[in-house]
Amino acid sequence: MTEPASAPGTMRTVRFHENGEPVDVLRLETAPVPEAGPGRIRVTVHACGLAPADWALCRGLFPGSLPRGIGCDVSGIVEAVGAGVTDVAVGDRVFGTADFAGQPSAGAAERAVLDHWFAVPEGLDLIRAAAIPMALSTASWHLARLGLAPDRTILVNGAGTTIGYAAVQIALVRGARVIATAGETYTEQLRDLGATVVGYGEGLPERVKALGVGQVDLAFDAAPPNGALPELVEIVDGDPQRVLTCSDMAAAPELGVRDTFHEDPTKRTDDELFGVFPEFAQLAAEGRFAVPVAGTFPLADWRKALEISLTGHARGKLLLLPGGAD
């Protein structure tokens, strides 16, 4: 069934007007098309990635003016260019991040204003491109904070998550040895990439020791909170400063483990967060980097995508296709 088109000057978008549980506060509605202000661009959205961070925003993470949209990861075609922008032109294919904090809507819309964007290289389709931004920026920033270097051994806990899967690939590209904890879904793919894979869960230090890989220098925790942090500390010779989590913020402080929110905020520069994008977009175009896509949905089916995400078992990126693209 063909969805009705928006009236001129308006668009369909999924957003919330009050904080609360996403199933209660989110709705698909019609809103004015946003303007591309200075230093911004507007795109017609081809694909938009959803993530647990979107549901955290609904619940009040990073509070700001309302209404506010969901969907940070975006790919599309440039439709308007704001003052001071000189690196793109109308009609260019780009991917990047929606200006969710500065606009009353975000990527889950027919049009979106981006605050960071990059060219989509030949060979990379817009759906795969839209899966990349949050996973790539989060994984690369955390690995940089850990001090990842060639010939070091890192354990990535939760390598089946989009962030963990990206972290494994980044670490391998950087010349590190990688041990990955994962379930059955991505075990073979992770091995094919070059990682040594072990099952997650209780008894992890013993399983890692049995691998015979020697010293584990660093551990990055990207898994949903599951009580694994004490075992990760044990694996890195009892030094909690060699463990960094992007997920278990509650348990980290009492163990002395580093976590996202307590890392030095002055080091969260655009270059650290986004400087690797051109490199890894090209690798993705060459088939040498990817963020798994679990499913695509028309914008009208956003609730179905939400329900899958809230199970915690999406097994890859969930993407909305506001333009009805395949």
Image (cartoon, grey):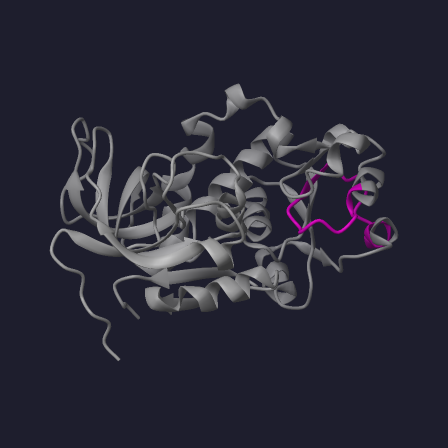
Q: Total label count?
A: 0
Q: Say left or right for 278 vs 184.
A: left
Which residue is located at x 19 percent, y 31 percent? 85
Q: Position of residue 20 (x, y in %)?
A: 52, 49
* Residue 252: quadrant of the picture: top right
Magenta span includes 215: yes
Q: Residue furthest bottom?
A: 1
Q: Residue furthest top?
A: 266
Question: In the image shown, does 105 or 81 lie closer to the viewer?
Answer: 105
Q: Quadrant of the N terminus?
A: bottom left
Q: Which residues are magenta?
A: 207-229
Which residue is located at x 61 percent, y 30 percent? 261
Question: In the image shown, does 63 or 144 lie closer to the viewer?
Answer: 63
Above or below, 137 relative to 289 = above
* Residue 184: quadrant of the picture: bottom right
Q: Position of residue 39 (x, y in %)?
A: 24, 29
